[in-house]
Amino acid sequence: MASSAAARIFAIVLLAGLALVPALAAWLDQPFWVTLFTRILIFALAAMGLNLVLGFGAMVSFGHAMYLGIGAYAVGILSYHGVDNGVVQLGVALVVGALVALGVGAICLRTSGMAFIMITLAFAQMLFFLAVSLREYGGDDGMQLKGRSLLGPLDLNNPTLLYYLAYALLLAVLFGFWRLVHARFGMVLRGCRSNERRMASMGFATFRYKLSAYVISALVCVLAGMLMANLTRFVAPSYMAWTVSGELIVMIVLGGLGTLIGPIAGATALLLVEEALSSLKLGVPWLDNLINQHWLALIGIFIVLVVLVLKQGIYGWLVAKKP
Amino acid sequence: MTTGLFFTQLLNGLQLGVLLFLLSAGLTLVFGIMNVVNLAHGSLYMMGAYFAAAGFNAFDGSFLAAALFAVPGTLLLGLLIERIVLANLYQRDHLDQVLATFGLILFFNEVVRFVWGASSVYMNVPSWLSGTVNLFGLPYPSYRFAIIAVGLAVGVGLYALINRTRVGMLIRAGASNPDMVSALGVNIKGLNTLVFGLGAALAGLAGLMAGPIVSVQAGMGEPILILTLVVIVTGGIGSIRGAFYGALIVGIVDTIGRAFLPTLLRELFDRSVAQAVGPAIASMLIYLLMAAVLALKPQGLFPVKHG
């Protein structure tokens, strides 16, 4: 799919556009844009991670927000105890994330279809309630971080630098996934998407492939969670609320399921629409007020319409239009 | 801990269990026969509670009015949702259904905030159920006891409907092979709508019954939706029997766990440890239970036997 010219142009324009955001924000004197777009990049990263299982493996995980939470809480809890070395935090987060993903994945992947959706959701809820009950670390209200992660010479308190760190990670994961999806591993995974029984009878240990994909996708979300904690200097159970898992899926479907660029496009589109609706100024006070307060209702309708009408997502639609 | 307290908590667990059963029966039927996942089921429950509160407050405290608002109201709303959104998604995969109904949840939460405001709405226990009943020398609130009775009655009614009537036979047949049922001349679309409406009405009933004992507010459907999903997965997706036993197990384990686990841990471990992990483990208990069930029986405790 990615071979068509329109798709390639779209991908290049999107990625180049994202690279120029801090410059544009500085030029137009809108420093808020950098924060907004860092958020977009972080969600794009998480959505891309989820897309590995959702899009390429057809495993509808409704619980990936919990890995965002693990990443965020790894930063939060370690910094609470005075460990603010970013590399240590990264190591701990990835190890914890991998262990949780291995355990959760091994149980969840015993089921498929509907049960898989529900059990991944249930595990995410379990972790959510665990976070809520951690009174030491803020409980329900979350906790403010003392400082951002220390990464040698990189000062994450500089918003532009944090932006480009997120951007670099996004590109790195994009490249890694591009290689992964087109390698043997990705082919087996996509084979399982079409017909797992056939793959199994051809001799592939499909469970191991699916579990590996699950763990990799979880780790990308852990990474996104760490960035999130550093962006907001705040961790809270709401990072792993089930609606976040839902939003990640919306981003993927909106952008284009099972494409590499799709999740990035979807995250950008959804978060920009949310931002636009929540601060919309049409000049009609009562209508503005209504939309700014109840924009989630419009997002809800928007999601239903995307599902009913735009079946292949933005990117898939672009690609399909031109042969 | 005294025996009396234990039994009270057991009854509370049973009460949560039957409430969960009202919700999971509808959801599991919809899934079993139409192969559709409807996350907006929790929203139907929420709307049921709001309709009930509206009826209750409009007719100065008449519980009957609340019931007449809640159950037919959610029934109609359910039919509307089915016709407008879900009927277009029967042929699509679960992902699309999950997404569309997720969108509906966001929509309904905001509608409720818009119409009834952000703060919670109250409705009281009807005066004729405000006392206590005496169960073997144990005083128990009549209203909670009424919930248990209604839930069990619905369970018996559903059992009779599914296993003893012609419609029930068609529902069972539709669940195993919709194409064949349709080929035999049964209006499967109508059957789908009927089942969805039944599920919605049950969710509305659950909302009505829960109205006086929980705070009726936007988003109240989500926690209970997730419990309902746990029930369905534990019991076996698509099985009414599984939903019934699953709901009781989840209701009782959750309530008993929250009530007694922290105290129990305090006797086993250091006070500070128990205080830190007690509530955490108690709130995770049902998910651990579900994980254990699925690790041993991926199809759930009472899987549906097809074929």
Image: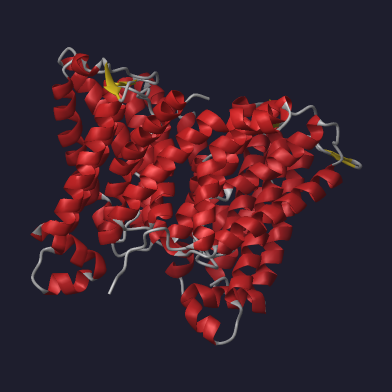
Quarter of the image with the C terminus of chain B in it: bottom left
Instruction: Indicate the position of residue A53 as horizontal and vertical percent values.
Output: 57, 63
Q: Residue at 50% x, 46% y: name it.
A: A247
Of residues A151 and B141, the one drawn nearer to the viewer in this rendering: B141
Relative height, residue A250 to residue A283 (above, below): below
Q: Residue furthest front?
A: B136
Q: Position of residue A47 (x, y in %)?
A: 58, 53
Q: Is residue A296 above or below residue A186?
A: above
Q: Quadrant of residue B4?
A: top left
Quarter-of-image position of residue B266: top right
State the scheme by which the image is colored. Answer: secondary structure
Q: Is residue A10 visible?
A: no
Spot occupied by residue A118 in the image (x, y as percentages of width and height) = 46, 53
Where is residue B273? Give x, y as percent: 72, 30
Q: Residue at x 18, y 16 (%)?
A: B128
Position of A16 relative to A200 (above/below): above
Q: Is residue A165 left or right of residue B46?
A: right
